Image: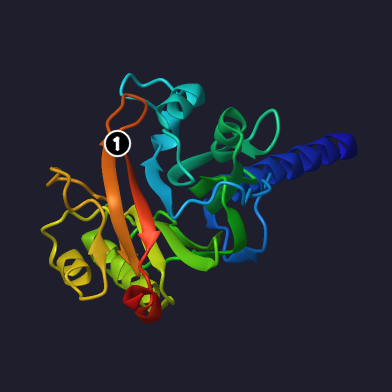
Amino acid sequence: MKNITKKWAICVFLLLAIAGFTWVGSRRVSTGPDAGTRIRNQLPVSTENYRQSFRIGLFNIHSCKGNDGHRDVGRVARCIPNLDFLALCEVRGIRFPRDTNQAETLAKHLDHGWLFAPASRRWFHKEFGNGLLTTMNVEYWQRIPLPRKHDYSFRNSVLVGLRHQEHLIHVLITHITQRDDRERRIQLGVVTRLFLSLAKPSILVGDLNTKPNDPMIRTLIEMPDTADSMSNQNAPERVDWIITRGLRTKKAAIVRNKASDHPLIWAELEVEPSGEEADK
């Protein structure tokens, strides 16, 4: 009788342990804030070929899932033109065979430096968030969680300091929720205030899940010192943005593709001259 009782106790303990492990692992939790001064595989920047401008892009890669339902990181890589900096949204971590992520895999295809900035963890690995690929010198990066009051997903912003010649350019990458409009407006307000607090030159680049006719985005891009780099593109339904302060846009383009449910957008930018430089 004692042996039977002992076996039942062991079985109950194991079942409770498995249930507890499953509950803890299945819960999606925030990764919280983080910061650093370097990114992975940061490349040495050559000063031999001086370029006044640089190209920055945004691609919501939809976890590398194309319109045909297949996930193909290589197909996403083939969509990416020659850019100096590419912000990524909807980047997924991969549990097996090791804790890697799609930003790292894309960087290997393109020979770029990379950063994965997950917003959530699940099943004991970094699950989902934003990222970047670049050949530019990153002097700092900071991961900033966004408010979460009405929506169940976790979102963040990534603030990056890029060195371009003698200029430090502040880039704010983000992906705002669309599931709950109350949350979208709260997050857009937080991101807008952070962007406007940055020293110029600065760039807001992200999937804002906000169309050009939205009053909040109109207020932002109609400010005297801000500019919508994609304003000359015929895309009234777009939700992806490159908004600048202290920079001017030389050219911009939308790259439509079948590798994601979003187009890739990019702009060639140059720093506006200061007062003394403009008078020369």
Residue 15 is situated, as x and y percent measured from the top left of the image, at 69, 40
Q: Residue at x 45, y 45 (%)?
A: 88
Asked whether the viewer can see residue 175, the reply is: no
Placement of the C terminus among the 4 image quadrants: bottom left
Q: Residue at x 32, y 19 (%)?
A: 68
Residue 13, quarter of the rendered image: top right
Q: Residue at x 65, y 46 (%)?
A: 124
The single residue placed furthest to the front in the displayed view is: 280
Residue 257 is situated, as x and y percent measured from the top left of the image, at 31, 27
Q: Residue at x 35, y 70 (%)?
A: 246
Q: From the image, tell me which residue sits under label 1.
A: 263
Placement of the N terminus among the 4 image quadrants: top right
Q: Give, as a three-letter code, the residue at label 1.
A: Pro
Residue 208 is situated, as x and y percent measured from the top left of the image, at 29, 56
Residue 212 is situated, as x and y percent measured from the top left of the image, at 15, 56
How many labels, in total?
1
Q: What secondary structure is marked by label 1? A: loop
